[in-house]
Image: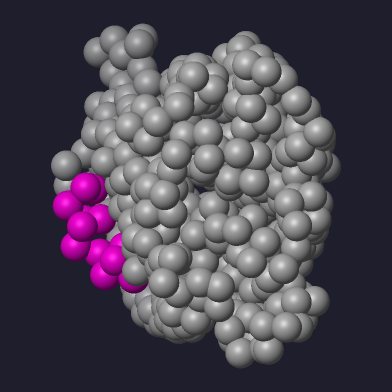
Amino acid sequence: MDSASDTNSEKREDHTHASSTVHSYDVDVGAQLIAETDTPLTPEEASRLRAKIDWHIMPLMCVMYLITFMDKTTLGEAAVLGILEDANLTANQYDWLGTIFYISYLVFQYPQNLALQRFPVGKWMSINIFLWAVVLLCHAACKSFGSLLAVRFLLGMCEGAITPGFLIVTSMFYTHAEKTRRIGYWFLMNGFAVIILGFISYGLLFTHTTSFMPWQWLMIITGTVTLITSMLFWLFFPDSPTTARFLTPEERVAAIRRVQVDQSGVENKHFKKEQFLETIKDPKTWLMAFFAGSANIVNSLTNQRQLIVAQFGFNGIQTTLLGCVDGVVEILTIWLGVVLASQPSIGRSYAGVLMYIPAILGSILVSTLPFSNKIGLLFSYWISIFAIAPFTIFLGWVSSITSGHTKRITTNGIVLSSYAIGNAVSQFMWKAQYQPRNHVPWAVITSCNFAAGVALVVLRFMLASENTKRERETPDNKHDAVYIVDESGVERKVDKAFLDLTDKQNRDFRYVL
């Protein structure tokens, strides 16, 4: 018997239960690296490695999310910079420009998620960001509803890779306990984007050129910045811990070992039909989809905020500057939300509900305060922005309660498709016949916020019940003796965490609350 066979036999003798061999493409990409070492990480080593990962990827993620949100909301700023008059847009056409973005996002969401599984994540996002920049620059040449509709459609297609890509990368590099804050950090960049865009728009209000309107300069400025950022992203953003250039070979192994405790692995590049079907049949998938849709009805304020504040009785310059306060409120609420969610005694569900309470109060006050009380209306509107925080908390939660790479990307696709539906349909609430009080849109926002809060509580109850059930089960050692064959023909044991099992298949998986 040859040496390879001897090695295999010795290993199998250590196991009293049945063992099996699987193909390398069936397991997580981290399996080969982890199989090479059993050295545990000390808390100091893990902390030092996390700091290095933070410094290398979080700045890029934060800057990129800031820019993409700034680009996405240029339409709202353009409303007070002359696009309505210059392109001869009616109120209904303007609403369609907001809606078509999310229709495109919806159509291309699952194809984008499949591409993120098939191709290197960082490179695929970089390509989409580059195309995004080109399309944004093309906005400046559009002077009709049809041409603006076309570029907004293309913008939505490209944006479909950003959030799911960021969720995948965050899941690769961070533990469940760390994801909520990390996702909160790059999501609160939306608030900084609102502030920066507000000051840019304020400066453009005083820009007078014969050939270019202020809104066109806005598209050129934001598009150019995005173009430069896409190149930096291509050069420096990692695709996976297994290939990250800023990590040494030893640190790559340690990075994978660090997230092993979550029992959810890093990634698998092969689509698995059985995981897809499990996702479709999983009740929590559709409860999460319901939450994502209802929670994002309030996101219609992204394109409407400038018009709403103007209707309170503020002029163009005041409205533009007050828009910066929107960003400050968004930053503070998201930060507060993720801090609350990170507290074990509160958790994700209850933190989201706590943020919905002032948001619902604010949306009720906007609709019921006397219209002459424009300061009261303004502050009520700012309080309603608290409703943005729960979805940020939820994004970190989704990746922490889903395992199996195909299941994870399918879940992301369904959840973000529902996000797109909520954003798309909500644009049509803001009809001219409801202005200036907009009682109907605010009533819809209030109802959907309440429904989303209930969905969070139900989801927590479902997950807690499943955790209790698993604690009472007899330990399942079905996947405790699984091997892969390396290039030299030697079989190596694979830890259960790197078998690319779903959260239902791996009974050691526990749902984060």
- Image coordinates of residue 252 in percent, x first then y, are 62, 25
Image-based side of 312 in relation to 153, left or right: right
Of residues 459 and 290, the one drawn nearer to the viewer in this rendering: 290
Q: Is residue 277 left or right of residue 270?
A: left
Q: Residue at x 75, y 77 (%)?
A: 374
Front-lying residue, 250 or 309: 309
User: For the stretch drawn in magenta, what is the main secondary structure?
Assistant: helix
Residue 152 is inside the magenta segment: no
User: For the N terminus, which image quadrant?
Assistant: top left
On the question of residue 183 being in view, the answer is yes
How many marks on residues? 0
Q: Is residue 302 above or below residue 491?
A: below
Q: Position of residue 156 (x, y in %)?
A: 40, 36
Q: Is residue 277 magenta?
A: yes
Task: Choose between 222 and 413: the one closer to the eye.
Answer: 222
Residue sitting at x 76%, y 83%: 373
In the picture shown, does residue 74 fall above or below 243?
below
Quadrant assignment, res 355 = bottom right
Q: Is residue 128 above or below residue 331?
A: above
- Quarter of the picture containing the C terminus is bottom right
Instruction: Return the x and y of residue 38 as percentages of the image width and height.
Output: 58, 34
Location of residue 396 by image quarter: bottom right
| Residue 292 visible in the picture | no
Residue at (64, 46) in percent of width and height: 80
Name the outermost residue toward the front: 210
Percent position of residue 434, x then y: 45, 74
Q: Nearer the viewer, residue 481 or 245?
A: 245
* Colour option used: one colour
Identify which residue is drawn at 50% across, 25% down: 139
Q: Which residues are magenta?
A: 275-288
